[in-house]
Image (spheres, rainbow, N blue to C red):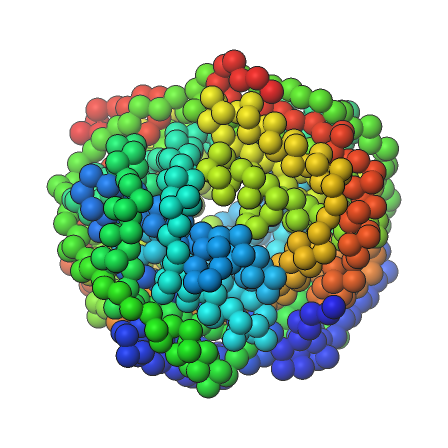
Amino acid sequence: MALNPSSERVYEHRLDNGLWLLFEPMPWLPTLSTTLMVPFGSATDPDGQEGSATVLHDWIQRGAGKLDSRAHSDALEGLGVRRGGGAGREMASLSASFLASELAEVLPLVASMVAEPRLDEHEFAPARELAQQELHSLADNPTQRLFNELMARFLEGGQGRSPYGTEAGLAALRAEGIRQDASRRLGPGGAILALAGGATWDAVKDGVERAFGGWRGSSVDLPEPVLQRPGRAHVAADSAQTQIGLAFPAPLPSDPDAYVYDLALHVLSGSMGARLFTEVREKRGLVYSVGASYRALHGFGYTLGYAGTTPERADETLRVVLAELARLSEGVAGDELERARVGTLSSVVMQGESSSARASRLASDALLRGRARTLEEIRVEVEKVDLAHMNDYLAEHPFPDPTVVTLGPRPLAEEVAA
Amino acid sequence: MSVDTSGAAQGAALRSDRTVLGNGLTVVGEHNPFAATVAAGYFVRTGARDETAEIAGVSHFLEHMMFKGTDRRTAADINRSFDELGAQYNAFTSEERTVYYGAVLPERLSELLDLLSDMMRPALRQEDFDVEKNVILEEIAMYEDRPHFRVFEVAGRRFWNGHPLGHSVLGGQDSIRALTREQMLTYFGRRYAPSNLILAVAGAYDWEAVTEEVASLTGAWEPFDAGRALARPDPAQGTGETEDSKLERVHTAVFAPGYAADDERRYAAAILGSVLGDDSGSRLFWSLVDKGLADSASLGHEASDGAGAFVGYVSSAPERATEVLDIYRRVLVQAQDDTLDAEEWRRAQRKLATGLTLRAETPLGRLVSLGVGYQSLGRYQSVQDVVDAVMRSSLEGGRALLADRPFDRLYLHTLGPANVPS
């Protein structure tokens, strides 16, 4: 299988302040993408100030260094930078994509948001107000609401908290409190900066040293994710569809059998030919959307499942989904594994063509595995997985009981919900 | 000012290809020697605008049915074949077009072309039609729970005021329930003419092999005429509202007259849309989102076949809706009264140029702009051509658009809980 030559190499460097820099060159591209991940998120929001990370993430983008909010934004946009990011459960991210020729000018503007945010008083109220608006908008977004409710019942404490925060938490926030929060957890320790695209390692390393070398500040440790006991819950909502969400623990990304698990999940839900789509949608026409996907937090892996269907078909939909989860422990067929393998390998190559996809994969590998992987390494590991071992693994590790949350006009029937 | 999008001589190395087959099918390509993959897709010039009320939603339902089997393949065969190719694939339907596409490693291109071409002559079996109808009804129910989407269904219909661009892509529960397989067959027979399709290929390929294979795969397709009458739009202006007591927020869709996909002013219109309503750094952003008055406030320009529109959205708390909508409207109207600033124009140009370049990083991303561009203009445009056109588009051109005062002719539609004044 042909891979681009650049996938042979990921460059890494640890700055003196602790920031971990990773770079993968894609010399044929005119573009460059960066992902900066800083370890503050809703899991480490101070008690009673739920939503703090989201407000902090917004506030640091409202002026930095010598530039006020407007001037800072204009400077980035004048360079044609496309921005993204947000505060998550464990990490907050700032991403940017731009023409590689602008690297030296873009980096200081990105760095200043974390190294010298102004946190001007008059920008605090609108930052908090915006977070409150977004929290209220959740009410009109049943799917997002479902996943917040599901995570709150799946994990204890920190990681169970939604980055949207709570009404009371947001109301309790004060500018001075967020400034203290920034001094507590907006530091370079545990932060990751990943870049991919059409630049040289020398230019990237020099530019990053210059822009981020002066960043100081402390960081907080993440709490260990703690599981709640699996159970069932229903959240009443006046919606056209019943939203069904499932969550259960899965191996860590660094687990020796992580690739086995990943391919098994691909057999279950990796494509329109996969088992869930075939059984729930193609054969029975129960849903438009159904699927399962792997997620990871620091030191914890899990799988999320989802189906959306009209209330009268919700019982049958959940029954079929659960049956497919259970059936996986009976093993997969050789042709199913081969399709999952070719799909995974092909998507690795496709991901390798996009600068933003590569930058975010580098960042998540660094975060969750503690090291970067080349595309070649992934290819070799995926090729290694064999059918007999996979089926032994699946027989020995049936999926654990899931936490199931439904959101819709009425709860599911007893025999399914019991 | 110019922006160079070519990395390591990539721009110079791109090659465009085009062949029109005997049956009228146009095959176009953009060969990229640096690509590790290849994407291919059929772009069909048919969509909701080509439907009557009786068959509303048939284009989209048909798009689903195209995956349900052919004389050679069952639905399961099609899904399994895509998986065996390691393809990333999907399809979408809009008012304008229906697109079926996939991306694979170069050595699987021949099989992908075989599969996609076979799908273009579907079996449309009754039993598959009956099961898939339920999936379509579930999709309609899913969007009912998405007010951000729903408000555009209503607002588009009102704004386009009888023009086919206001048709719903999904159709309604009633039209879908009543739709028969025979009606779908008739529609298919009217719209899927070889001359109404473009096959686009982007990335790593051998053109001679592609055209030979496609000619053989599609040789039996009978040519016929599948035109599209371009009615002149007479868009509505003013306001409308839909009440839904279940909602917490007020969702507002905004429309104003714009420019067609082959109108040179579309570039200036896109830049103007970004100046006024990009997600970041635009006038609406600073007036509403930055201040925390609305969690979303945007505007962009959508250029379609024969007509176009500025299309926007704003979400706010019910108690603030009046204030927010006043500000939204004032930002647009004031842009007509004061003037555009050279710096904000340049920033929007540069953001658009970056966005166009980023989307073209992958063959799959490039495929869509390649196919849509060919379909709209009947000719090839490289990404650099489009970026150049954006960067050349002058501030005076933007001012000329504002001198036509499109935002005096706004249509705003609100969807939210009761008693929201618009």
Where is B360 relative to A306, above or below?
Answer: below
In the image, B12 versus B415, the foreground residue is: B415
In the image, A321 versus A243, the foreground residue is: A243
In the image, B203 versus B304, the foreground residue is: B304
Residue B385 in sight: yes
Is B44 displayed left or right of A362 in the figure? right
Q: Position of residue B43 (x, y in %)?
A: 71, 52
Residue B189, picture quadrant:
top right
Q: Residue at x 65, y 36 (%)?
A: B331
Q: Residue at x 70, y 76 (%)?
A: B11
The extreme bottom residue here reads A202
Q: Residue at x 53, y 37 (%)?
A: B288
Where is A398 relative to A241, above or below?
Answer: below
Q: Position of residue A355 (x, y in %)?
A: 51, 69
Which part of the image, by quadrant, shows the C terminus of chain A?
Answer: top left
Q: Position of residue B14 (x, y in %)?
A: 71, 75
Residue B86 in sight: no
Count of number-bearing discs: 0
Is A197 displayed left or right of B13 in the figure? left
Q: Residue at x 35, y 76 (%)?
A: A213
Where is A121 relative to A5, above or below?
Answer: above
Residue B204, picture quadrant:
bottom right
Is A129 displayed left or right of B29 in the figure? left
